């Protein structure tokens, strides 16, 4: 498979065209905004937490195929996860999309389909914007998270 | 004057020997920054190898030579802009610094509470933010000349917006995002009738045709060297002499003074008054060399050629129903902006990059303009003197590939 076909594979195109969990949770436990000033991608992530578990997570905003698909998959994969599981998964995802050698036994599920990003260093920020926003929401940061 | 041949001219630009992902470089991003002719590289090499020293005040030969070369570059810029007086040219880092300089210094002298500054909806952030900063400080107001869906200025609205409170009209000569060519002479005549001054942002325009500030009758004209096939970090502001003389200095420091005591400093004359510190000496000299080169070109043929290249892009894109052009200005120069339904410009940029095609995807530092068209970003293809029909062909094939990857 060529780099491009790998990057824009069916699963990613599908998530970018039909993003899952798109919207805003009413009365979320926490939420945050993410912004990539270079390309104008904007995302709002709202989260419902119960007993330390992410019960629901939704996102809205606009962005490229990579950032939209990454956010969509994030919401699917994070539902039902404990808050303290988020960081190791983010680390593993980050290693995956940057092509770092760090070995991990974390199962990334659908997120693994984003591995193709590693051949496109300029697009890593697209893939990680929703993750930085998720972290900011959980840490209850009020300022807009920027990739810059 | 050499007969214009884009393929021959292209050979003067060494970057085109470069392969991108194994493919020849198709460079359609000259509006962001133009590639550099060999003559620029040679002039910089020769300057650093043979003449380098700091300018002004040095009593030794090298400093004398460097000063002569720096001031000769000022002369060349003056002539290229159509003024006989090199003292009307102030070297800056680029158009952005030029506009900041004029906004700050003009504001201090001429703008008071309740006054108005007029900009247009087409402007690059660099011709918005400096004025915003200045009006906030001066208690003045920023007004915006509207545009229509084609991306042309609304001249009727402009005339209504011009009032006796208007101190400055700051407009772009050519829009960096849409390619709209503004009718500068009309704008300046109307501004002057109302007693306002006019600054023209020439960053985009100058690369597509030499200009004449006297014919435009503008009070200030700014441009960046790097978009004119010259070095980065150098640009210039033309200003009418009588206006320059009324403005306070921009930055304080060496070179901009006549004499300094702890009690009182008197300033140097224009233009040194606005060039504090050691300037970008090599940049100015390189820019001068590029202007010498540009002056040998047949610009009437280049203008026709560049228009043909833009028309080829428009014609090629018209084949794809998924492509929507952004802006259809009455008079266009150098730039085509478009979007494709359901594909974000950055994805288009990434796919084209793998084909060796460099275009720009984004808001082009013109977010208010993007808001006007209710889009976050566009894809922008822009041409230069080295653009060939083959470039456009490759680009159109690239767009086909984009649609294939996205299965559209």
Image (cartoon, coloured by chain):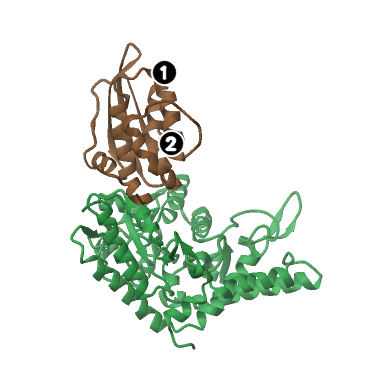
Chain colours: A brown, B green
Residue B293 screen position, x and y as percent:
54, 79
Q: Which residue is mark 1?
A: A84
Is residue B238 shown left or right of residue B348? right
Q: Chain of mark 2?
A: A
Give the CA separation, mark 2 to mark 1. Answer: 20 Å
Residue at image position (44%, 74%) is B386
Determine the image quadrant of residue B52.
bottom right
Nearer the N terminus, badge 2 or badge 1?
1
Residue at image position (45%, 77%) is B210
Determine the image quadrant of residue A110.
top left
Residue B231 screen position, x and y as percent:
56, 65
Q: Secondary structure at mark 1?
A: helix
Front-most of B136 and B121? B121
Residue A42 screen position, x and y as percent:
33, 39
Residue B351 screen position, x and y as percent:
35, 55
Front-most of B101 and B160? B101
Q: Which residue is mark 2?
A: A96
Is residue B138 shown left or right of residue B73? left
Q: Are marks 2 and 1 on the same chain?
A: yes
Q: Chain of mark 1?
A: A
């Amino acid at each position: 498979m060529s780099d491009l076909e790998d990057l824009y594979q069916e699963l990613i195109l599908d998530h970018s065209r039909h993003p899952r969990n798109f919207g805003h949770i009413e009365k979320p436990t926490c939420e945050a905004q993410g912004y990539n000033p270079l390309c104008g991608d904007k995302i709002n992530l709202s989260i419902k937490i119960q007993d330390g578990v992410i019960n629901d997570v939704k996102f809205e905003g606009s962005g490229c195929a990579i950032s939209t698909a990454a956010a969509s998959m994030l919401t699917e994969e994070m539902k039902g996860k404990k808050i303290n599981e988020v960081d190791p998964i983010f680390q593993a995802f980050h290693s995956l999309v940057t092509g770092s050698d760090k070995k991990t036994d974390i199962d990334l599920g659908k997120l693994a389909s984003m591995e193709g990003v590693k051949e496109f260093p300029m697009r890593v920020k697209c893939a990680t914007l929703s993750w930085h926003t998720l972290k900011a929401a959980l840490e209850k940061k009020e300022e807009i998270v920027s990739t810059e | 004057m050499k007969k214009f041949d884009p393929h021959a001219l292209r050979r003067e630009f060494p970057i085109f020997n470069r392969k991108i992902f194994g493919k020849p470089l198709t460079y359609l991003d000259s509006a962001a920054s133009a590639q550099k002719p060999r003559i620029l590289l040679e002039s910089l090499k020769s300057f650093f190898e043979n003449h380098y020293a700091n300018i002004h005040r040095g009593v030794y030969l090298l400093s004398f030579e460097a000063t002569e070369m720096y001031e000769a570059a000022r002369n060349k810029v003056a002539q290229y802009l159509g003024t006989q007086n090199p003292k009307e040219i102030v070297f800056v880092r680029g158009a952005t610094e030029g506009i900041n300089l004029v906004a700050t210094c003009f504001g201090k002298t001429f703008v008071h509470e309740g006054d108005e500054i007029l900009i247009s909806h087409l402007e690059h952030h660099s011709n918005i933010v400096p004025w915003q900063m200045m009006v906030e400080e001066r208690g003045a107001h920023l007004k915006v000349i509207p545009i229509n869906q084609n991306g042309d200025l609304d001249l009727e609205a402009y005339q209504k917006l011009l009032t006796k409170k208007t101190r400055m009209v700051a407009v772009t000569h050519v829009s960096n995002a849409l390619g709209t060519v503004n009718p500068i002479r009309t704008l300046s005549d109307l501004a002057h009738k109302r007693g306002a001054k006019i600054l023209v942002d020439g960053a985009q325009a100058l690369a597509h045709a030499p200009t004449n500030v006297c014919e435009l009758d503008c009070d200030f004209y700014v441009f960046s060297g790097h978009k004119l096939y010259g070095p980065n970090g150098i640009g210039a502001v033309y200003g009418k002499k009588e206006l320059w003389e009324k403005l306070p200095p921009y930055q304080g420091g060496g070179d901009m003074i006549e004499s300094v005591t702890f009690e009182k400093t008197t300033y140097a004359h224009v233009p040194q008054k606005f060039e504090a510190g050691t300037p970008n000496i090599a940049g100015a000299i390189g820019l001068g060399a590029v202007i010498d080169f540009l002056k040998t070109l047949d610009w009437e043929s280049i203008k026709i050629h560049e228009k043909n290249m833009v028309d080829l892009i428009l014609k090629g894109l018209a084949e794809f129903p998924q492509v929507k052009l952004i802006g259809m200005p009455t008079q266009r120069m150098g730039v085509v902006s478009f979007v494709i339904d359901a594909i974000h410009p950055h994805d288009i940029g990434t796919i084209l990059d793998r084909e060796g095609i460099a275009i720009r995807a984004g808001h082009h530092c013109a977010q208010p303009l993007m808001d006007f068209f209710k889009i976050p970003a566009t894809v922008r293809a822009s041409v230069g003197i080295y653009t060939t029909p083959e470039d456009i062909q490759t680009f159109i094939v690239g767009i086909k590939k984009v649609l294939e990857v996205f299965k559209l």
